[in-house]
Amino acid sequence: MSGYRDPASGFDPDAYEQPGPALTPYNWVQWTGVALEVIGIALFLTHIAGKLGWIAEIEPARFGFAPMILGIVLINSRRGPPTQIGREQLDRNKRMLFITLAILALVFALAFAADWAGLLP
């Protein structure tokens, strides 16, 4: 039997190419994505400022999530060609992942401790 089940065929259904970076200079579609990102982040920051009591709380601030997602999609609508990732880049990526996870673990631990101590509203 020939085809994708034959190990000698070289077909890998789980293989995919890593897309390259977003192409620059941005076109109008990508700039629209940037504008949506800014709007979403502004709504998120007003929500946080309202929760902290700096401004009056704005209830529809939760709608900032949708513009951010749509903005990411529009920014990444034009991608460059895929690039091969070398061993040293994989090692850098792995190290950055561990650093990011350590920072997030620290932030979550501090947030849990602040919540447990009653410092958060």
Image (cartoon, rainbow, N blue to C red):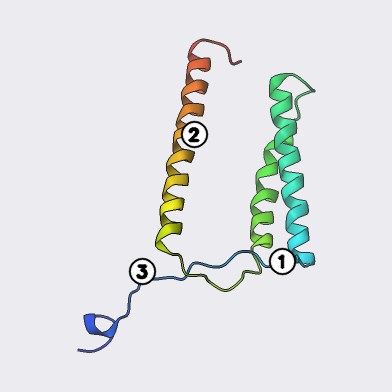
Nearer to me, 22 or 94:
94
Q: Amino acid at mark 2?
A: Leu
Marker disc for residue 68? none
Mark 2 closeness class: few <14, some 14–19, many ≥20 residues within 10 Å: few
Q: Nearer the viewer, mark 3 or mark 2?
A: 2
**Residue picked out by circle 1:** 24
**Circle count:** 3
Check the picture and name the quadrant holding the N terminus: bottom left
Nearer to me, 55 or 21:
21
Q: Which percent across, then down, holds residue 73? A: 64, 60
Whether residue 65 is visible here, answered yes or no, is yes
- Quadrant in the rendering for residue 19: bottom right
Left or right, residue 120 beside residue 31 = left
Structural distance between the alpha carbons of marks 3 and 2: 30 Å
Structural distance between the alpha carbons of marks 2 and 1: 31 Å
Q: Amino acid at mark 1?
A: Thr
Nearer to me, 100 or 50:
100
Q: Residue at x 79, y 23 (%)?
A: 56
Mark 1 element type = loop
Marker disc for residue 14? 3
Mark with earlier residue (2, 1): 1
- Look at the picture and state if 18 lies above or below 116: below
**Residue picked out by circle 2:** 104
Structural distance between the alpha carbons of marks 3 and 1: 30 Å
Q: Which percent across, then down, holds residue 111? A: 52, 22
Which residue lies most toward the bottom here?
2
Mark 1 closeness class: few <14, some 14–19, many ≥20 residues within 10 Å: few
Nearer to me, 12 or 46:
12
Q: Which percent across, then down, holds residue 88? A: 42, 58
